[in-house]
Amino acid sequence: MKKRLIYIAILIGFVVTGFSACSDNIDPVVEELEFGRLMAPTNLEARVINRNYARLSWAEPAGAESYTVEIYADSLGSGEEPTGTPVWSRSSILPEELPLPDITLEGETQYTARVQALSQEKNSSKWNAVVFETDAEQSLYAILPEDLEATQVTLRWPAGLEATHIAVTPGAINHPLTSGEIAAGVATITGLTGETEYTAVLKNGEKTRGTRIFTTLIDLGNATPIYPEDDIVVILNAAAEGDEFVIFPGEYTLGKFTVTKSLKLSGYLPNDKPVVKGNFELGAATVHKLELNNITLDGGTTTNEVFVTASGNVIDSLVVNGCEIRSYVRQLIYNNNATTIGDVRFSNCIIRDFGNDGGDGIDIRGGSFHSLTVENTTFAIGFRTFLRMQVACTTVFNRCTFYKISTLDNSNNVGLFRVNGTGAEFTVTNCLFVETGPNPYTVVQSGNFCRNDANMTDASPTYSNNYIWSCYNLLTGLYTTAAAISATEGDPGFQNAAGYDFTVTNDMIKSDQVGDPRWLE
């Protein structure tokens, strides 16, 4: 033990002596690191814009004088070395040239993009890479009204564009393209069924070059046609349970029509909708289904509601598709009775120019309501509180555009969404909100997203991928940050909002597919 203690003492002595000998030679603190090569660009991002365009961005390292960018068509990970020849490359890119213009690539392809920084003073940086995949191309033009019939459709695309065939579903139709069709960029698909939704895909081998969804015109079959010279009220009152009617272009006076049986009303031409003036009262009966397609409903600024219930009514299903609904005084749907409402769906509609006093937009104060689904729809101008759902309903808004909604400066305007039925479920995804709420305002919480906890009884509402812009007072009350409703602030750059053209020019919003899809092409 004595010998071991002597060794330890000697060792400590050496250490102390060493520190003493070196204390005068300690280098000063290093405050700046100098490297012989540039740092690699960081935060490299490849964002797909308009299906098959790539937008590259990165953080510029200090000292970088230029950049080289290469893009490879491969399926490598971002940490692997690309092989072969790049499909796109450019060198000597100056910092003042950034951001780069969008780069055109093939659709449905996985790419690796890599960036290197260069300087005359230092060695080039290491490459930084990112992997991304483009979406399917969209080279099919919108279908012209005159190209759509009950049993066939004519499809058009850029003349001479390389393609092999057109696939149409349902029906597993495969139409090989002739050299003449490719040169002209036109092909007609026959053998279709009337009033059926189809998906047509222009293909080049396995690659998609364009996709269009369309619904063939009505093959009258057993449906009863209604023409402008007919008395629509007399015809509908004489209908049997489940009758279908096709309404040809023109104007019709419906008044307040009481629905006591299942009906299906469809406009014959989607691009020339019949204008029906009046509204629908769901009468004191059980109605299994009321379906409206491709009709313009006009309240003439004097009709209060579009759909209103009567006491004792039961409606299992209300479907409204492809309709324009305009110029009503108050409500889109109003129920203040012990009514039983099943499933209600609005799809592909434009709903505009409603009054904003004396009632709320979707105004459900009693009874029961199973589900409300609103998708691919635009709401423009009007409504006091937009949604007042005081029953246990499952409510979903997806891919909708809201413009100048809930703009009344009044304490009765409790915001866009009031959902206070016990057991309610609420979802808002992929929606765009622009200039909602009053401006200016005196009531601090008028026009907000949701006023308070009492107005949101869904303990875990679902919000995802929304955008907001110039919304006055939206983030007061229950939600005070954009993140709380999963929203990003971004100007959609509407083409002509005053003329009801809400075409989006903001590439980020288009890329994220937010709002009514009709405005994103």
Image: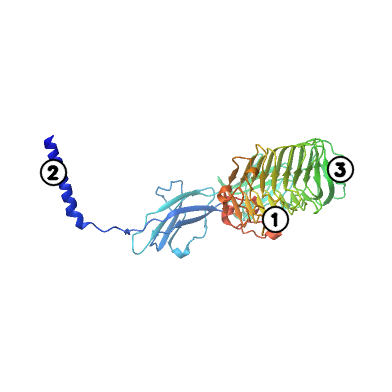
Query: Residues under labels 3 and 1: Cα distance?
Result: 44 Å
**On residue 10, which mark appears?**
2
Q: What is the three-letter code of the residue carrying label 2?
A: Ile
State which tag comes first along the sequence, 2 or 3.
Answer: 2
Residue closest to the eye, 221 or 393: 393
> Is residue 107 rendered to the left or right of residue 142?
left
Q: Residue beneath label 1, please?
A: 409
Q: Position of residue 394 (x, y in %)?
A: 66, 39
Q: Residue beneath label 3, please?
A: 235
Residue closest to the eye, 17 or 465: 17
Q: Residues within 10 Å of mark 3 (few under 14, many from 20)?
A: few
Q: What is the three-letter code of the residue carrying label 3?
A: Ile
Residue 409 vertical position relative to residue 13 in the rendered view, above or below = below
Image quadrant where one finds the C terminus: bottom right
> Is residue 3 rendered to the left or right of residue 318?
left
Q: Position of residue 440 (x, y in %)?
A: 67, 60
Q: What is the three-letter code of the residue carrying label 1?
A: Asp
